[in-house]
Image (spheres, rainbow, N blue to C red):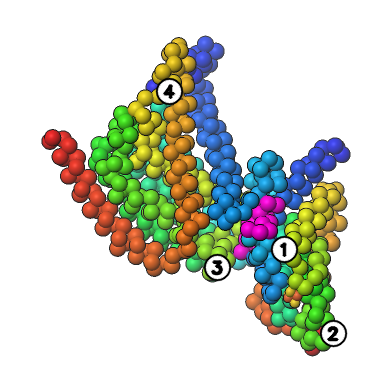
């Protein structure tokens, strides 16, 4: 098991804690870690996006609250927390209130699958890739729920669009995951990361560049990011599926969207860019002569930083796309994923199988 | 008790005043100035207000940018009532302050948006410059910072409209109890 877990067990046994408590507390600690990480990333991400878009349109961006506007999103969050909770007249109450929770909880669960460092894999499962896809679909269902229950035609259209997009783009995503599974021979994310650890040329982006591009575009469609943000197209649909939600319930959708953006980027980094591995093949902390436990600890921190750098790079690309491209229409989005991405992804599986075969022969 | 309340007041007012998300609502020429206030020369993003929400449920600030006609009045009222509670209104431009240049002889213009909904900040001029809009937002922020949770009841009652729409479906028909629509006719 991981070094953190061993230290934790050691510590708890010295305290004479009962076994069930040790077990339960470890999961609680992981949960708190993920929750804090999630909130902090979302707050930073929203602020960063606003600043970055401002940079692209030659503006200053938020700069009055805190130093360089660093507390802007904190102020937004507090305001949203206190906002009035509006209940429209013709909603389907049960579904209306479950939708914001349902959109958020699967995304939060997906966070547990990511191997953040070699020692910190919150939920190590032998079928992480399958779980990833399954959980992603649940949050799409929640968006459909939100659109359906609001009793508003714009919301309904937004929800349906989100659903149509997600169905059409989950197939290319799944096919790309299959190509990764063929290359690594496993569905376990930890093994996938460990098979690309030696150097930058071991990353799966190099044989599988086509898969990377298809995965990235399809992920943009699933995330409802520009240029595929049709479900919340402001010029046509008011605010799309969440137009009847106010205050905290709206904040849940907002939070879910950014958490999804981050997590898909982290997934892409894990699958194609070597995850927490350093691109040089060695870690800076290996060069130091420290006691093994400190060294391991530093190594874990360094791995976490590498993962964050790769994820941040992908997020930067997504924001760059947002600042550059206008929105596509629905049928062009669907045509793109059904007629171009899906056949290409199938073709890609074929190429990857051939590549794997040749590598095993030669 | 007072100390706790005033601390909460401070934090809450700080948050409210620094994230005023405006509603995308512009009825005529003043709207152009509002748009240019978001663009790079003026940039209301600096004060945290560049997040224009299209849905009134998520907006805090209604900038009435332009002339309000009798046909637009019910829609304005509906939008105002759809907004969630801490909500503020800036009447931008002479038209929405008092009727402006339509004041004397127009049969179709409401002489001042405050006849329909309560207004927090009046911003005259025809059209106001983007700097003036930013100044109005700053003034509104200062006003929000004076608020207190103790005086909340008074605040809410001062932000209620006297007019009411009976049903969302027939917003465009003239109603008996909505006196305002008859004024100019
Ligand atoms: S105040 Fe002037 S610029 Fe503004 S809406 Fe009226 S006429 Fe147009």
The secondary structure making up most of the magenta span is loop
Mark drawn on residue A284? 4
Query: Where is residue B170 drawn, in percent x and y?
Result: 67, 79
Q: CA distance from mark 3 to mark 4?
A: 50 Å
Establish whether labels 1 and 4 are both on one chain.
no
Dot 3 surroundings within 10 Å: few (below 14), some, or many (20 or more)? few
Range shown magenta: B40-57
Regarding mark 1 in the picture, which secondary structure is present there?
helix
Regarding mark 4 in the picture, which secondary structure is present there?
helix
Is disc 3 in contact with disc 2, using a CB cutoff of under 8 Å? no
Please identify the quadrant where the N terminus of chain A is shown: top left
Is disc 1 in contact with disc 4, using a CB cutoff of under 8 Å? no
Is disc 3 in contact with disc 4, using a CB cutoff of under 8 Å? no
Dot 4 surroundings within 10 Å: few (below 14), some, or many (20 or more)? few
Q: CA distance from mark 2 to mark 4?
A: 78 Å
Q: Which residue is mark 2?
A: B104
Establish whether labels 3 and 4 are both on one chain.
yes
């Amino acid at each position: 098991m991981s070094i953190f877990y061993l230290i934790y067990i050691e510590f708890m046994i010295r305290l004479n804690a009962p076994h069930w408590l040790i077990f339960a507390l470890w999961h609680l600690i992981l949960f708190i870690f993920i929750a804090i990480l999630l909130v902090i990333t979302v707050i930073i991400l929203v602020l960063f996006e606003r600043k970055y878009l401002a940079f692209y349109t030659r503006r200053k961006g938020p700069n009055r609250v805190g130093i360089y506007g660093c507390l802007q999103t904190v102020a937004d969050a507090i305001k949203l927390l206190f906002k009035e909770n509006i209940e429209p007249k013709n909603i389907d109450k049960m579904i209306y209130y479950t939708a914001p929770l349902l959109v958020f909880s699967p995304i939060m669960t997906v966070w547990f699958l990511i191997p953040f460092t070699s020692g910190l894999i919150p939920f190590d499962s032998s079928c992480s890739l399958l779980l990833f896809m399954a959980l992603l679909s649940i949050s799409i269902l929640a968006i459909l729920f939100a659109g359906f229950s609001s009793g508003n035609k714009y919301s309904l259209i937004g929800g349906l669009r989100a659903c149509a997009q997600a169905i059409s783009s989950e197939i290319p995503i799944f096919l790309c995951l299959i190509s990764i599974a063929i290359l690594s021979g496993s569905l376990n994310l930890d093994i996938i990361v460990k098979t690309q650890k030696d150097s930058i040329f071991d990353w799966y982006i190099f044989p599988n560049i086509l898969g990377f591009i298809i995965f990235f575009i399809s992920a943009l469609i699933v995330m409802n990011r520009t240029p595929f943000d049709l479900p919340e197209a402001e010029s046509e649909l008011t605010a799309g599926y969440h137009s009847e939600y106010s205050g905290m319930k709206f904040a849940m959708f907002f939070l879910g969207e950014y958490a999804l953006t981050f997590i898909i980027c982290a997934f892409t980094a894990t699958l194609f860019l070597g995850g927490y591995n350093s691109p040089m093949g060695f870690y800076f902390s290996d060069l130091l002569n420290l006691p093994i436990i400190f060294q391991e600890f530093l190594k874990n921190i360094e791995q976490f930083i590498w993962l964050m750098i790769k994820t941040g790079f992908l997020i930067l690309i997504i924001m760059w796309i947002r600042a550059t491209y206008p929105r596509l229409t629905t049928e062009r989005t669907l045509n793109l994923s059904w007629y171009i991405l899906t056949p290409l992804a199938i073709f890609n599986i074929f190429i990857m199988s051939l590549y794997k075969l040749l590598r095993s022969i030669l | 008790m007072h100390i706790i309340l005033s601390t909460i007041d401070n934090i809450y007012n700080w948050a409210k005043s620094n994230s005023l998300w405006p509603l995308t609502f512009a009825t005529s020429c003043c709207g152009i100035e509002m748009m240019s206030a978001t663009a790079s020369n003026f940039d209301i993003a600096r004060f945290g207000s560049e997040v224009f929400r299209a849905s009134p449920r998520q907006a805090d600030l209604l900038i009435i940018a332009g002339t309000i006609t009798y046909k637009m009045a019910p829609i304005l009222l509906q939008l105002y009532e759809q907004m969630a509670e801490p909500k503020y209104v800036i009447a931008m431009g002479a038209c929405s302050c008092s009727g402006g240049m339509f004041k004397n002889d127009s049969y179709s213009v409401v002489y001042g948006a405050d006849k329909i909904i309560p207004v927090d900040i009046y911003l005259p001029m025809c059209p106001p410059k983007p700097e003036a809009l930013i100044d109005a937002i700053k003034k509104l922020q200062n006003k929000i910072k004076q608020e207190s949770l103790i005086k909340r009841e008074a605040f809410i009652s001062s932000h209620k409209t006297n007019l009411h729409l009976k049903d969302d479906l027939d917003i465009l028909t003239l109603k008996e109890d909505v006196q305002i629509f008859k004024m100019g006719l």
